[in-house]
Image (spheres, rainbow, N blue to C red):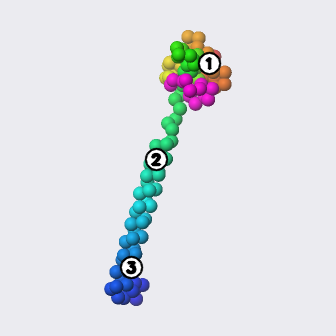
Amino acid sequence: MSEFPPDLPRLRTLETWLQLTLDQVRKAITVAQQQEALQQRAVSPPPPDWVLQLRIDGEGQPIAVHVGGCRTAGRRARPISRGQAMRALTEGLEPCALCRPDTELGIL
C-alpha cells in the first residue's frame, strides 16, 4: 500500500507543493552559502611575524621593533621579515618592552 494519494489531482497537488518546498530550500542554501562566503572574506589575515613601528610625524622613521600582533605597535607599523627584524635590533633600534622581539629572536 502506497502512502501517496491514489488519484491524479491530489498527486499533482503534492508534486506542486514539493516543488515549491524544494525551491525554498534551494534559495535558503544559496543564502547560507553567500553568508558563509562573506564570513570567510571577513576573517582578517594572521598578523605578520615581525613589525616595525614608525614615527607619527610625516617622516615615518622607524622607532621600534615588535613581535607581530603586538598592540603597542599602533597603526603606523610595517611588516618586516625575520632578517630585517634582527638587523634593525642589532643596528640599535629599540625592541618593544612588552612583546620583547629581541628575546623571541634570540638577541639579548
* Frontmost residue, 10 versus 99: 10
Answer above or below: position of 67 versus 2: above
From the viewer's perspective, tell me whether residue 25 is left or right of residue 12: right
Residue placed under numbered mark 1 in the picture: 95
Query: Residue at the location (61% across, 29% down)?
Result: 71
Residue placed under numbered mark 3 in the picture: 14
Residue 11 image position (x, y, % from top left): 36, 82
Answer above or below: position of 68 versus 7: above
Q: Earlier in the sequence, mark 3 or mark 2?
A: 3
* Frontmost residue, 84 versus 108: 84
| Residue density around tag 1, few if under 14, some if 14–19, many if 20 or more, within 10 Å | many
Is 106 part of what is drawn in magenta? no
Amino acid carrying mark 3 in the image: Leu
| Residue 103 makes an appearance in the image | no
Label 3 SS: helix
Amino acid carrying mark 1 in the image: Pro
Amino acid carrying mark 2 in the image: Leu
Query: Residue at the location (53% across, 32% down)?
Result: 47
Q: What's the magenta region?
A: 67-79
Residue 76 image position (x, y, % from top left): 55, 23
Kindly indicate the quadrant of the structure image that contains residue 104.
Answer: top right
